[in-house]
Image: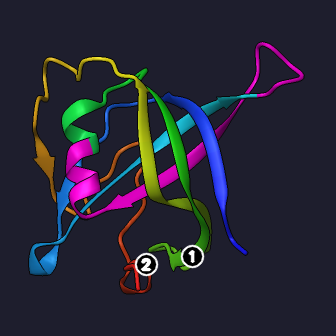
């Protein structure tokens, strides 16, 4: 069984990516407070596909409190220098908007291309596509 559930706050507003064949995807990081330390958190990469990705981008922004249920996925890619990078993420199957915050005023409804880079995005690879 591969099921994960977390509750946390988005560290950055998610951006919608339009991929080939009309597919949509977004990823973001959720900060999950550690129950035994008040001032520490784990930062978990989350990826959402399809209409759920579009809905998430529409209603959530940096600081939104979300409840996520999904499955763990590990993938890897090779950097230009030849180093292999491994990524563990939650592929979101259900998301609950517990306390939404407005999206950044600079980027309402903005989409980005699949391979643009930011501080939390990773390249989309063919083996990452959901089954």
Residue 36 x/y as whole percent: 89, 23
* Residue at the image point whose x is 29% and y is 42% from the top: 56
Residue 38 in the image: above or below residue 5 = above
Determine if the magenta segment contains residue 54.
yes
Residue 83: image location, x then y, percent: 60, 75
Does dot 1 land on a helix, a strand or a loop?
strand
* In this view, 85 is above or below 53: below
Q: Which residue is mark 1?
A: 75
Residue 106, relative to residue 116: is it above or below? Answer: above
Which span is picked out in magenta? 34-55
Q: Considering the image in quadrants, where does the C terminus appear? A: bottom left
Looking at the image, is mark 2 or mark 1 earlier in the sequence?
A: 1
- Asked if residue 21 lies in the magenta stretch, the reply is no
User: How many numbered badges does the structure rendering display?
Assistant: 2
What is the quadrant of the N terminus in the image? bottom right
Q: Which residue is mark 2?
A: 128
Residue closest to the far right: 36
Query: Is 109 on the left-hand or right-hand side of 38?
Result: left
Q: Alpha carbon of mark 2 to alpha carbon of mark 1: how far?
A: 7 Å
Do the numbered discs 2 and 1 sit on residues whose CB atoms are within 8 Å? yes
Q: Which residue does the image show at 37% across and 24% down from the upper left?
A: 62
37 or 55, which is in the foreground? Answer: 55
Choose top left, top right, bottom left or bottom right for residue 108: top left
Q: Is residue 72 left or right of residue 18?
A: right
Residue found 21% across the figure and 58% down from its top: 51
Closest to the observer: 51 or 14? Answer: 51
What SS does tag 2 mark?
helix
């Amino acid at each position: 069984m591969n099921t994960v559930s977390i509750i946390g706050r988005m560290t950055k507003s998610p951006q919608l990516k339009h991929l080939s064949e009309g597919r949509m995807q977004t990823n973001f990081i959720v900060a999950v407070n550690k129950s035994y330390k008040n001032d520490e958190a784990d930062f978990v990469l989350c990826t959402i596909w399809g209409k759920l990705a579009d809905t998430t981008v529409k209603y959530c922004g940096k600081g939104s409190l979300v409840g996520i249920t999904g499955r763990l996925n590990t993938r890897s890619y090779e950097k230009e220098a030849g180093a292999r990078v491994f990524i563990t993420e939650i592929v979101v199957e259900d998301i609950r908007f517990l306390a939404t915050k407005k999206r950044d005023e600079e980027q309402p409804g903005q989409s980005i291309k699949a391979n643009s880079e930011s501080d939390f995005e990773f390249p989309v690879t063919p083996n990452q596509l959901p089954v």
